[in-house]
Image (cartoon, helix red, strand yellow):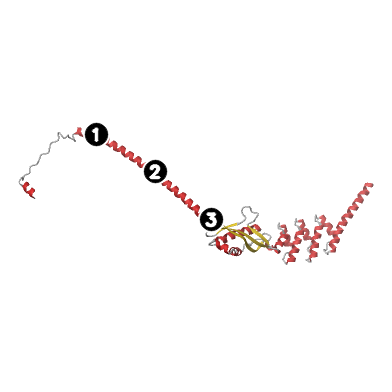
Amino acid sequence: MYVVWSLAIATAIGLVLVGYWYFQLWIQAYSTGTGIRFLDLVFMSLRQVNPRAIVECKIMVSQSGMPAIETRLLEAQYLAGGDIRRVTLAVIAADRAGIPLDWDTAAAIDLAGRDILEAVKTSVDPKVIVCPDPKDARSDVLFGIARDGIQLKVCVLVTVRTNLAQLVGGATESTIIARVGQSVISAIGTCEHYHEALRDPMLITRKVLSEKLDANTAFAIVSIDIAEIEVGQNIGARLQIDQADADYRVAMAFAEQRRAMAIARHQEMRAKCSQSQVRVVLAEAAIPKSMAEAFRAGGVQSDQKRPKPQKVRSPFPHLKHLAALA
């Protein structure tokens, strides 16, 4: 019997405490004109919804003077995993700033994983993006080369405002940084001489702004400013030196090829000369044999056996005197 009475007393005390907690929330909601009933608070707990979070959001909307947001919309956003407090603050901030933003759009942006409150703040107070991204360890400046081959190092500040209409599905800051960097390098490349960009950096910003780089992004570019620009290396001269070195190596390779061919041709001619000398020696060696065979065949006679030539007597000896006078 004692146990039963103890359980009854404990249950009664629990019901009183729970009722007091719900009653306190209901009094808070009723006093601010949110229109939430007592049973609605109880049913919220049964639906795994935090009644206090719903009441606080309804109170913020009511006190800001905005049209009331339906309780079922708040509960649906809470059950979907959204941050109803930040969404409510974003809607209120947009209404105060005169930015058109309804609850459905803000809830969709929040469920898409974007920080809707930060987006509204950026839309009111533009944000400055450094290009290139300082978090990128590869380089802290952009490298562009003018047509005369001189390298310029540039750091750009891009002021952007959130475009709430394209926040869902729009490209992020990384796309803005990549597009601006590409356009800056292209603008430097159109300069005939590097001192044109040094004399008037607005040449770069005007070209970049004219290309509508914020298309299909979650931001609208307000301005682009050159924060730093300085002269780098003479890339053109270095490339010419490298090209000359490459041409020299190619010429040396061709010269070495021709030298090797000449040496091979020289050795070939020496071999042919040796072959000719061998043929001469063989021919000289064959001369005695040929002479011996000629003697044996009688084709050649010695001087002793050869008859001496006889003088032919002129038939007109008296004409010698006339020939001498002539």
Q: CA distance from mark 2 to mark 1?
A: 39 Å
**Residue 125 vs residue 35, the one in the foreground:** 125
Instruction: Inspect the image, locate mark 2, and give the three-letter code of the amino acid beneath it.
Output: Ile
Q: Is residue 308 left or right of residue 258?
A: left
- Dots 1 and 3: beta carbons under 8 Å? no
The percent coordinates of residue 60 (x first, y second) are: 79, 62
Farthest-out residue, right: 1
**Residue marked by disc 2:** 263
Label ID, residue 288: 1
Q: Tell me whether circle 2 and circle 1 mark residues in contact (CB < 8 Å).
A: no
Callout 1: SS? helix
Tell me the distance, in whole angstroms, between the alpha carbons under discs 1 and 3.
81 Å
- As drawn, 312 above or below 36: above
Q: Is residue 12 left or right of residue 55?
A: right
Q: Is residue 38 left or right of residue 235?
A: right
Residue at (48, 51) in percent of width and height: 245
First in sequence: mark 2 vs mark 3: 3
Q: Earlier in the sequence, mark 2 or mark 1?
A: 2
- Residue 294 location, quadrant: top left
User: In the shown orientation, is residue 238 left or right of residue 37?
Assistant: left
- Marking on residue 12: none
Residue type highlighted by circle 1? Pro
Residue corresponding to mark 3: 235
Q: Residues within 10 Å of mark 2 (few under 14, many from 20)?
A: few
How far across and how far down the image is residue 115, in percent?
Answer: 72, 58
Q: How many marks?
A: 3
Q: How far is mark 2 from mark 3, CA to CA?
A: 42 Å
User: Of helix, strand and loop, which one carries label 2?
Assistant: helix
Q: Nearer the viewer, residue 43 or 100?
A: 100
Q: Is residue 288 positioned above or below 92 on the image?
A: above
